[in-house]
Image (cartoon, helix red, strand yellow):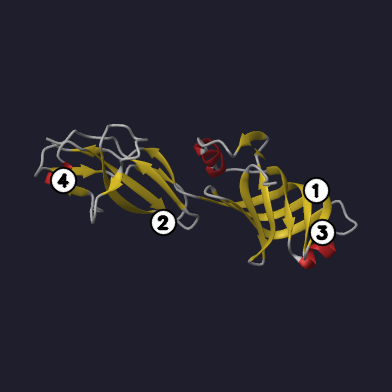
Amino acid sequence: MAISGRSLRISRNGTTIAGARTDNFTLTNEPIDITDKDDGGWRVMLADAGSRTVSADVEGVLKDATLIAEAVGTSTLLLKECVITVTGIGTLTGDFMLTSLQLGAEQADAVTFTATLESGESMTVTIGPYNTVLPAVTGTTTVGQTLTTTNGTWAGDATITYARQWQRGNVADANDPSWANISSATNLTYVLVSGDLAKYVRCRVTATNSVGSTIAYSNIVGPVA
């Protein structure tokens, strides 16, 4: 049975040592549901300056033979200079303790495990891009006229790059299945063509940094006359 929650990769010396999942973190004594789609709040907490501590109940499959040997017969295990990667959110680098460690059934060259992950006093945090102000499209919605989009406002660590894709749809509903990419329309500006007549237009912006990518959509304009 699949484990619910968001994936959590644990690695040391550049090698992933556990395939784990968790639903909740306790960050600096504040409980946070990392499966919540509105996860900007805990990204902001991670980005705050000052002491940070992390606790998480995790479960998964342990695949590192050396680590399995070290874990046998112990309830706690120090993982030095580890990188904890939470999919789509960011990375936490530092020393962590696997406490309440329980090894379970063997699966070929791996064993299942449950544990509580506790951080040390110092962590390096890298946050993936997250949107704080949506992209905004402006201009006259008439064939032959030019629409302009912003990238929106984003936060996150390292250098953030942006990729745009203009789209057209049949109705002004962001979830309508008719939305489709407009060929070669990837600039900050887009000149409306006859194919846009009576359609609606928006722009999708993808922000990317060393952690990963996040998508945001602009306001919808139209119908095009």
Residue type of the residue flagged with mark 2: Thr
Q: Which residue is mark 1?
A: 99
Report if the CB atoms under discs 4 and 2 are less than 8 Å apart: no
Question: Between disc 3 and disc 4, whose residue precedes?
Answer: 3
Disc 3 + disc 2, Cβ < 8 Å? no
Q: CA distance from mark 3 to mark 1?
A: 20 Å
At a point 83% along the width and 52% down the height, the residue shown is 104
Q: Nearer the viewer, mark 4 or mark 2?
A: 4
Residue at the (22%, 34%) spot, across then down = 221
Q: Which residue is the site of mark 4?
A: 195
Does the image show residue 47?
yes
Query: Which label sits in the foreground, 3 or 2?
Result: 3
Q: Residue at x 50, y 55 (%)?
A: 211
Residue type, mark 4 in image: Gly
30, above or below 150, in the image: above
**Foreground label between 3 and 1:** 3
Q: Amino acid at mark 1?
A: Thr
Q: Amino acid at mark 3?
A: Glu
When asked about the image quadrant of residue 6, the answer is top right
Please name the residue that numbered disc 2 is placed on. 159
Residue 134's spot in the image, x, y percent?
34, 38
Q: Which quadrant is home to the C terminus?
A: top left
Instruction: Mark 2: give few (<14), some (14-19) or many (20+) Cα within 10 Å.
Output: few
Q: Position of residue 90 (x, y in %)?
A: 54, 50
Residue 88 in the figure: left or right of residue 64: left
- Residue for badge 3: 106
Q: Residues within 10 Å of mark 3 (few under 14, many from 20)?
A: few
Badge 1: residue crowd in 10 Å (few <14, some 14–19, many ≥20): some
